[in-house]
Amino acid sequence: MNKPTINNYDSVIDKISDSVPRVNISSLTPKIFAQRYQKPGIPVVITGMLENEPDWNLDYICEKIGDQEFIFRNYHLEKNDSQQQEATVVGSGVALERMKFSEYAELLRNGKAYESDIYLGKGPLKNTTLAQTPSFQTIGKQLGLTKPVTGFNMYMGAGIHKSGLHYDLMDNTLMQLHGAKKVVLFPPSQIYNLYPIELYHHFFHGMKLRSCFSRVSTQKPDLETFPKLEQALEHKQEVIVHSHETLYIPSGWWHDVIALGDEMVCSVSRFWRVYPSTRALLSWSRYRSVIGFFCAMPYTTLSLIGALFGSNKKQKISDILYRI
């Protein structure tokens, strides 16, 4: 079966001139990392931290976690390249499916995962042997990141997947372990030039439609519908994160993560407390997401009550909590 693709790895590489700094871990100490990147909140690609790790190809991951069950997202390929102004679900709000990793690997091999853009997002490695990956145990110490707020979560799918433009509340270390990803970034200051989804949508969709997502497409900018996007594009940064590189994405930075090539692409992320605290306290983006969370509570509460009195109670509650 032919696998659909929205990009060609080599042609994308040729077109991108990285505007994000790239440094080797040998030239960084926790103090230097904090002064140059963490305190001012500046993205950076770090090389050398994962050089001793094997290639996380499909066979390797199957060997480690083949029988582990995960929640997968079904994005439906026909919707993958559209503008998001009419979206009613984004991110983890899409249809969810449960299966063993070995079953998902078969969908990748036979092309079905490509057809519907079935994606492993936020796949927890906590109860797997992959959580003991040696480099994972030292990344915080090497960068001076001492307060993780999540475990290690895997993000994996076909080379047609795009995350959609969004920002996170916490600092992120995105560790690329197989294939490559193109990441399009905008600074937090561009929030209203990027047309974030309005807060009131949380009342009607809960956490299925998140205010930390943008309505614009970075791949097909529509300046007629979104005229202020032209100003944001002046601040756009792009970078290719290659296998065994790590991208540090500070809280509030808008980013669209696009898997490159025609095969499976895999990365692992861990989120960290924002430091210094003033960077978090002065972030309107952060407050905006918190407000959105509380706006979603009535819808989420009603959904939980409905799940308690319906069929497939355990699965429905799990789906709701996964989206939170």
Image (cartoon, helix red, strand yellow):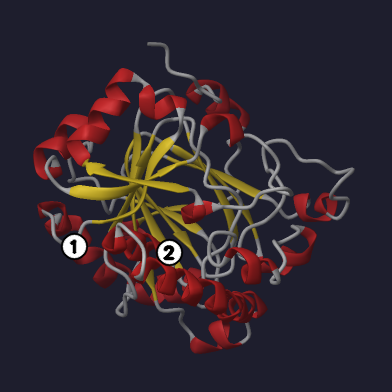
Picture disc at residue 172: 2
Would you call the spot at circle 1 few (<14 residues within 10 Å), some (14-19), or many (20 or more)? few
Q: Between 146 and 112, which is closer to the camera in this rendering? A: 112
Number of disc labels:
2
Q: Is residue 26 above or below residue 299?
A: above
Q: Between 153 and 51, which is closer to the camera in this rendering? A: 153
* Precedes in sequence: disc 2 or disc 1: 1
Which residue in the protein does label 1 denote? 126
Quarter of the picture containing the C terminus is bottom left
Looking at the picture, how far across and down is residue 273, in whole percent? Answer: 40, 78
Q: Secondary structure at mark 2?
A: strand
Picture disc at residue 292: none
Q: Amino acid at mark 1?
A: Lys
Q: Residue at x 24, y 31 (%)?
A: 105
Give the number of the mark in front: 2 or 1.
1
Quarter of the picture containing the N terminus is top left
Can the viewer see residue 21 in this picture? no
Looking at the picture, how far across and down is residue 99, in whole percent? Answer: 24, 42
Q: Residue at x 67, y 37 (%)?
A: 82
Q: Between 24 and 98, which is closer to the camera in this rendering? A: 98
